[in-house]
Amino acid sequence: ATGEWTMAPGDYANTRFAALAQITPANVKSLKPAFTFDVGVHRGQEAAPLVVGATMYVLSPYPNYLYALDVANNGRKKWVFDPQPGVGAEGVACCDLVTRGVAYDNGRIFMVTLDGQAIAVDANKGTQLWRTKLADIAKGETVTMAPLVVKGKVLIGNSGGELGVRGWLVALDAGTGKEVWRAWSTGPDKDVLIGSGFQPFYEQDRGRDLGVSTWPPDAWKIGGGNVWGWISYDPEADLIYYGTANPGPWNPEQRPGDNKWTAGIFARKPDTGEARWFYQWSPHDLHDYDGVNENVLVDLAIGGKPRKVLVHPDRNGYVYVLDRMTGQVLSADAFVDVTTSLGVDLATGKLRYNPAKAPRVGEVIRNLCPVSPGAKDWQPSAWSPRTKLLYIPHQNLCQDTETYDVAYIAGTPYVGVDNKMYAAPGRTRGAFTAWDPVARKARWSIQERFPVWSGALATAGDVVFYGTMDGWFKAVDARDGKPLWQFKVSSGIIGQPVSYLGPDGKQYVAVLAGVGGWAGAIVSGDLDPRDGTAAKGFVNVMKDLPHYTGKGGMLYVFALP
Ligand SMILES: O=C(O)c1cc(C(=O)O)c2c(n1)C(=O)C(=O)c1cc(C(=O)O)[nH]c1-2
Ligand SMILES: [Ca+2]
């Protein structure tokens, strides 16, 4: 219903647009905290709180406590569900102990623990309905993504691209937790990849065994392509869309070939998992450009003609507009400074790499932009149908890269890269940019001191929200980016802001604070990521973070007086 927030991306189209207009550019400056709630785990908070009826559902990072809060009573706790995940996920997860939230469907909450157990919980009582183990920690497999429920199936993908884990997306029966289908991102995937309807738009993405023949022998078995980002669903086309992450190892010289089906996007049928098309953002990925960022489904007038498209800001630095029926690239334009490639050939759909910036073992290659975490990482943008702008939280970072050969050992980092990251020349480390995908350019951009690692929220009141690593929750004018309001919270913000209508008829805005994630992991001093290269690289990026921006785990809910 209008005013609820029942899935992390807000809606199937992944717009993160709240059709609520009480909070406006004129009154937002009176926004005040209505209530707060401590989630008890003080590290990176990436989850979106959900609101169904008068209940808010909040999932903490590992060990993944699920809370039900009464929004009619200042967030009073109704119950907490402790899933008691197994030990071992900590120290295996690549990028802090994060989770991106839960999904609601038909009286049930669906959650995943970091060690990869999918659980259905009774949304009223907080009791477990079923539990299915999906991931194998011994292999380095974890789950951080928020599930999405489509047509009675719970869609969940795995993490582990930095540990040579083979990526998949699984569909579980929402009623029983039984596996309905599983689609692998690398390898032959005979069951659900090559159906009669598989029609990739580009020549390079056709062929029966592309998943095998684009790899050195057997390398696809430890080739990554994990599915840890966002899923969209178009009910009319009856297609789900989701991206696949980096190939393993990062060191590209160890895996010649296109490395299908990594760093690309799949369109599949939700009932069977059958693939309809695939497109590879970054064939033979050179820089850890996971392709898992959000795909926002919108209808736009392109060249004067109405088109069903998806808009996707990728780690490789381009905002793509794809025909979502066929996978054809309609445009791809850089939204940050890019040196690692020279654009996208719209005739062939191929990314044109810059050969001067390709990593070579034994050499330090300098000034690669964007960095491995990309022009933007998982932090989702928001779309306003009113302004027709995409609000992109992102970073402006470059890096020097040194690669080395690495051996595969199950459950340990399979990377082979040292990065040193720094602000792009002449830029601040982060920015919040409003992008016009029809005009193919930025309308405005706000410079930020640190990478902007929070999600964005757009509202019908033409107020857009985001948070910063140094702890500011901000409201800006959707039309021109004018700063309207900001509030200092107790830690850095990398959560996903949401908006809902309370039982009192008032519009609320909620966000979790707690710095962490990959960029902020070094701030959580007790974290010793086994992927030490990433932590080292980020020292420069997070330097000068105010010392009072400590760890956190606090929900903030705001309203007008
Ligand atoms: O390839 C993968 O399986 C995988 C998983 C994750 C994750 O699950 O959080 C991240 C990444 N890769 C990654 O490359 C990355 O930059 C990243 C940032 C974050 C974060 O939460 O801030 N997670 C991840
Ligand atoms: Ca990755």
Image (cartoon, rainbow, N blue to C red):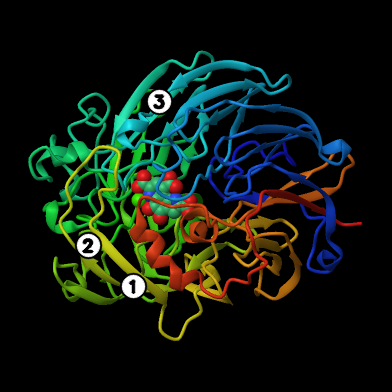
Residue that extends furthest to the bottom in the rendered view of this protein: 426
Q: Is residue 217 above or below residue 317?
A: above
- For the residues labelled 3 and 2, the Cα–Cα distance comes to 40 Å
**Disc 1, SS:** strand
**Residue type marked 2:** Ala
**Disc 3, SS:** loop
- For the residues labelled 2 and 1, the Cα–Cα distance comes to 30 Å
Residue 399 marker: 1
Residue in the foreground of this view, choosing between 136 and 262:
136
Residue 522: image location, x then y, percent = 49, 60
**Residue type marked 3:** Leu
Q: Residue beneath label 2, please?
A: 347
Q: Residues within 10 Å of mark 3 (few under 14, many from 20)?
A: many
**Disc 2, SS:** loop
Q: Which residue sits at x=41%, y=60%?
A: 535
Q: Residues within 10 Å of mark 1 (few under 14, many from 20)?
A: many
Q: Residue beneath label 3, please?
A: 134
Residue in the foreground of this view, choosing between 347 and 476:
476
